[in-house]
Amino acid sequence: MAKEVNQTQNFLKGIIKDNPVFVMLLGMCPTLGVTSSAFNGLGMGVATLFVLLLSNIVVSLVKSQIPSKVRIPAFIIIIASFVTIVEMVLEAFIPSLYEQLGIFIPLIVVNCLILGRAEAFASKNNLISSIFDALGMGLGFIIALTVLGATREILGSGSLFEFKFVAEDANTFILFILPPGAFIALAYLAVLFNKISIKIS
Amino acid sequence: MDYIVILIAAVFVNNIVLSQFLGICPFLGVSNKVSTSVGMSGAVLFVMTIATLVTYLLYQYILVPAGLDYLRTITFILVIAALVQMVEIILKKVSPPLYQALGVFLPLITTNCAVLGVAILALGLEGGGLLKAVFFAVANSIGFALALIVFASIREHLELANIPKGMKGVPINLLVAGLLSLAFLGFTGLV
Amino acid sequence: MSKKKDTFLNMILSLFVITIVAGFSLGLVNDLTVGPKAKAKLERKINALTLVLPPFDNNPVEDIKMIKSEKAKDSIEVYPAYLKNEFIGAAIIGITYKGFSGLIKIMVGFKPDGTIQNIEVLEQKETPGLGTKIKDEKFLNQFRNKNPLSFNLKVTKDGGEVDALTGATITSRAFGEATQMAYDEFIKNNDLFKEPKN
């Protein structure tokens, strides 16, 4: 059953071809909810990658021990544990990020991306493949969130990673840091992404 | 009086989907037909209300007194998953046609961030109290239903429109959602 | 790859083991982070106190007084500050749930006569770029050295003197309310700290 899996392909697919946000439409809630700034998008992306990686690893290691009927509850317990760990670590060591991400930290547990990869990949593949899958998908997620966050921050606050490049009183497209702006910015980024991925393939 | 404020806030001012970004996955995924949206909304109303009721009691009377509030996330999601299973089983026995109608939406509710999100938000309401928390859940599911059904009716019309190739599918849906969200932004300051 | 059979025993057993391991790990991480969490909280508090109060030489956190307030769910924290045993001000927590996104918690530093020394925003979930500007110098500066006796803490739209943030009237209004609440509690409980520290 051991096929020669091309780990590079395995890793890269998560970035363009199967990008979780733009292609698979997974993890929409945090994507729209925390990307009012580049830093928040990046932080959420990294937190999600952390959980995704650990969850894929554990699921891949214990997959043969879990009866198929209870696999979903089992995955949920595993994922929820790692999310809780991230919650506790952030609150203790990076409280500013913890405050910014707010309710979306516990919501990582229902990020369909993580449960989706556990179910569709980690429970059916070996450890190494699962690690690369998580890294690729996680990176694709980070890129999507950071780019969206940066777009919204630049247009909406005139800054990037808190570094302001317009005057204090300048009029910015405030719309983009408000809820409608999230949808609209993502819509146009999706169009851009489609154009780019067509060019690449 | 408080309750009217909660209702208006949850449905219009802080709409769970269009302002708080919870429940986006079903919002984008299930809203291609009004009929399925109604079904999903009904299922969400049911699960969200009962889930908030159970998780609120669990949190206040078991987790907090035992100093285990860090187990909040994991216990809440397990409660929700268990509830969804139970609802499926009960519905199958009690009303097979309704079960058929809701079909695949039921298991999807487990990963509906709106359910977990509302359960957590209900813990931080001003003044607290079980009744308020449950009412909050009901109000939010009404808000969810409103956003979903309105969006679905727009999408049904959109099927017949002439959309540029690059915008078809995801982009135009997101754009419509954005305009809807913009419209709801107008309710700011209502309460 | 072989999966365990779907027998009832296997299902219960595997879930049980996973839960035990999960519970144990979470308990462990909790123990590890409880300390740093409390430390971070305390540091933030001391930072805030230093920012909102005139210079002091006591430890306001140690001298903390809790007072019951009808406006808030739990008791309010009051931090009296002394310099060379003389009462030179107190920091009081002001709370409002009327922010755009709910809770806004601020710490207001008062001089003995009720004049505002400075305000620090402790907790808020307002709209980034709009309501969050209540943390900005530009907004906070209008409150410094003002006494709520003569400075109306309502926004100008409501007939007061607070210059609201553009596009964030609700947040600004709530902020004013929280400040008013802190002031009211300060005046009401003034006798608590009048005596010099022994």
Image (cartoon, grey):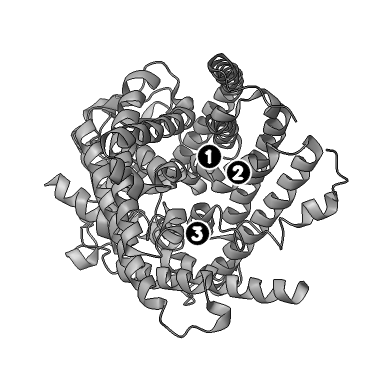
* Crowding near the residue tagged with mark 2, few <14, some 14–19, many ≥20 C-alpha atoms within 10 Å: many
- Please state which of the two labelled residues, at mark 2 or mark 3, is closer to the viewer: 2
Label 1 lies in what chain?
A: A
Amino acid at the residue labelled 3? Leu
- Which secondary structure lies at badge 1? helix
Task: Name the quadrant of the N terminus of chain A.
Answer: top right
Residue at the image point whose x is 69% and y is 51% from the top: A137
For the residues labelled 1 and 3, say whether their Cβ atoms are less than 8 Å apart.
no
For the residues labelled 2 and 1, say whether their Cβ atoms are less than 8 Å apart.
yes
Who comes first in sequence, dot 1 or dot 3?
A: 3
Label 2 lies in what chain?
A: A
Q: Is residue A46 left or right of residue B68?
A: right
The residue indicated by pointer 2 is A114
Q: Quadrant of residue B83?
A: top left
Of A23 and C198, nearer the camera is: A23
* Crowding near the residue tagged with mark 1, few <14, some 14–19, many ≥20 C-alpha atoms within 10 Å: many
The residue indicated by pointer 1 is A109
Q: CA distance from mark 1 to mark 3?
A: 16 Å
Q: Is residue B28 left or right of residue B45?
A: right
- Which secondary structure lies at badge 2? helix
Mark carried by residue A128 = none
The residue indicated by pointer 3 is A32
Amino acid at the residue labelled 1? Val
Determine if marks 2 and 3 fall on one subunit: yes
Percent of width and height locating residue B40: 34, 51
